[in-house]
Amino acid sequence: SQQGEEDPQALSIQEGENATMNCSYKTSINNLQWYRQNSGRGLVHLILIRSNEREKHSGRLRVTLDTSKKSSSLLITASRAADTASYFCATEGGANNLFFGTGTRLTVIP
Amino acid sequence: SQTIHQWPATLVQPVGSPLSLECTVEGTSNPNLYWYRQAAGRGLQLLFYSVGIGQISSEVPQNLSASRPQDRQFILSSKKLLLSDSGFYLCAWSVGGARETQYFGPGTRLLVL
């Protein structure tokens, strides 16, 4: 299966701390995406990193990709209570679809 | 700008009853469309995707079906719901294939009793 797996499954931190989530996958990819889901809502795209990129930034988000280890990490710096959500990585499942991981549930305590 | 709509937002149905969930997209043409199911606290399971009108690919065999009668309309159906069909159903669209970002609707929470 191409499905990504996030680690840890759950993460609880204090506001202001950094949060790091990891994603591992099994086969070669062209890109990897990270999504966020607030409880009971749809997913929102955060960032896409291509296989020839090693690091990408967007605001307080930093994503790294190590294709040799088939892994990616999402770092949220200076976390806020509003960052509380589930975070998913997604990789190509075929020509037209994505495989989503099981997600990391992040809780940021005010 | 593009928007995606799903309805209803919440649905409670008895076992054995039929189901019809609708998803429509505005502001784009010929999108790829997707139906996912998410069990409580779990990841997304791809159910169906469509690259064009009348073209449906099924990822998981089950008692659900999908149809795309119009370019920007995607319907998820069942003739007889099972208890195991309960979950959060998400529709999404993208401009292309697996290399592209997917944009999700707000979801439909289905409870089968």
Image (spheres, rainbow, N blue to C red):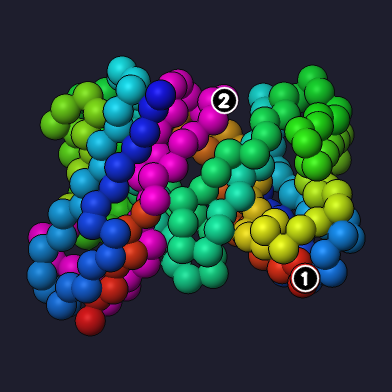
Residue under label 1? A110
Name the disc covering residue B99, or none. Answer: 2
Q: Is residue B59 visible?
A: no
Q: Position of residue B41 (x, y in %)?
A: 54, 69
- Three-letter residue code for mark 2: Arg
- Three-letter residue code for mark 1: Pro
Identify the residue at the far right of this view: A17
Write the residue at 47% across / 71% down: B40
The chain holding disc 2 is B
Q: Position of residue B35 (x, y in %)?
A: 35, 46
Write the residue at 80% across / 42% down: A60
Q: Foreground: B101 or A108?
A: A108
Q: Foreground: B29 or B81?
A: B29
Marks 2, 1: nearer the viewer: 1
The chain holding disc 1 is A
Measured in 3D between alpha carbons, the distance from the residue under mark 2 to the one under mark 1, in whole angstroms, is 36 Å
Q: Where is residue B100 in the image (x, y as percent from the top left)?
A: 54, 26
Identify the residue at the far bottom of this view: B113
- Side of A105 relative to B49 (left or right): right
Label 1: state its secondary structure. Answer: loop
Compared to residue A66, the image places residue A19 above or below, namely below
Which image quadrant is residue B37 in?
A: bottom left
Name the disc covering residue A29, or none. Answer: none
Residues shaded magenta = B78-106
